[in-house]
Amino acid sequence: MTYAGDFRPHRVAVLALDGLLPFELGIPHRIFGRPRDAHRRRLYEVVTCSVRPPGRVDTDADFALHVPHGPQTLATADTVIIPASYELGPVYEEGRLTDELAVALSHVRPGTRLASICTGAYVLAAAGYLDGRPATTHWADAERFQRMFPKVEVDANVLFIDDGDVLTSAGVAAGIDLCLHLVRRDFGAAVANEVARTTVVPPHRDGGQAQYVQRPVPDPQLATTATARAWALGRLHEPIQLRDMAAQEAMSVRTFTRRFREEAGISPGQWLTQQRVERARQLLESTVLSMDQVARESGFGTAQSMRQHLQAALGVTPTAYRRTFRTAGATERPGGTDIGSGA
């Protein structure tokens, strides 16, 4: 893929291993294949490679794939993604790389961003990339993963973990969340939201893996917390107390908090902060409101409070985020108006 001038799309190499799950292999191609700039140029170039010379790679389905690139392609990548495989052999059984896989990974340049989907985290861990780092994988594998790789700080409750240059996601569809997050990180929420819309998935899912762990089926007669969440999303710019949310469901605070965590995988307070961060991101990208106005609109109250929360969530200040992602069509917005859910 070539473009005139200095423009070069971000190159994503997807490592296809024998026994891979076709669904997970397709996630990076679907998500990263969509974003385009104002000139309709692709923002990413996605290539698939194998640990061997170009040729056949078996899947866990009743068909195989012809992969057109060998391991040398990893040396050209800005981001390398490793989907799950059911035939990891010594990687899964003993926590060590095969010679073939070790040679392939040796092509990865220092500073290349690495990401795994589901049990693809075993490859990153066996290669030592996750030592001393937080990571996640499918909740059903989390305990085994932790035993096999004690140097890794495993968190089985999240959909993905962004540790800068190394990212890991939970099982299967959490790879979509991870890839959308990378698009958001690279090119902003507006681009990621557009990709999510065309893919017909939510741009950001609440909670973590806790909501998918098998547990007794709840009584269908019991109420959920969906009404309270919708109520809160409509007034993020206002002070919202836990008791106010519980009142929307006619529950005690204790019952509401427990039910909310069961459904969303996080506490109501954590969820509110997530939604306010998303609201602030949208305002920083799409408006020219002052920092104080953005802070009030998103519910943080003061610019200093917003700065602290965005720094913790995104690793950058609001000013730096706006400088990177604000769109040319940013417009003024009256204070206090309802501007959407931010979810």
Image (cartoon, rainbow, N blue to C red):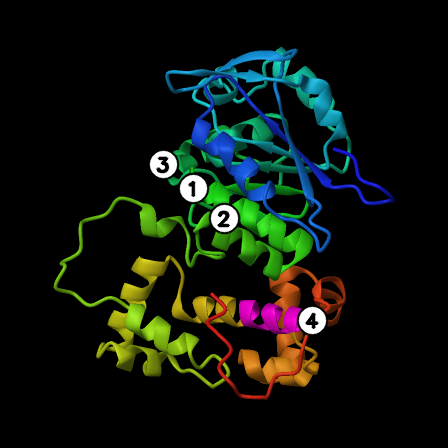
**Mark linked to residue 140:** 3
Q: Which callout, 4 or 3, points at the residue further toward the start of the chain?
A: 3
Instruction: Say if mark 2 contacts mark 1, CB within 8 Å.
Output: yes
What residue sits right under mark 2 in the picture?
177
Is the C-beta separation of discs 2 and 3 under 8 Å? Answer: no
Give the amino acid type for the residue marked by disc 2 in the picture: Asp
Q: Nearer the viewer, mark 2 or mark 3?
A: 2
The residue that mark 1 highlights is: 173
Is residue 230 one of those drawn in magenta?
Answer: no
Quarter of image, res 331: bottom right
Q: Disc 4 and disc 3: Cα gap in Å?
A: 45 Å
Res. 186 visible in picture:
yes
The CA distance from mark 2 to mark 1 is: 7 Å
- For label 4, the SS is loop
State whether residue 181 is above or below residue 25: below
> Amino acid type of disc 4?
Gly
SS state under label 3: helix
Q: Nearer the viewer, residue 293 or 244?
A: 293
Which amino acid is tagged 1?
Ala
Q: Is residue 86 above or below residue 300?
A: above
Residue in the picture at 40% in, 34% down: 141
Q: Which residues are magenta?
A: 277-286
Q: Nearer the viewer, mark 2 or mark 4?
A: 4
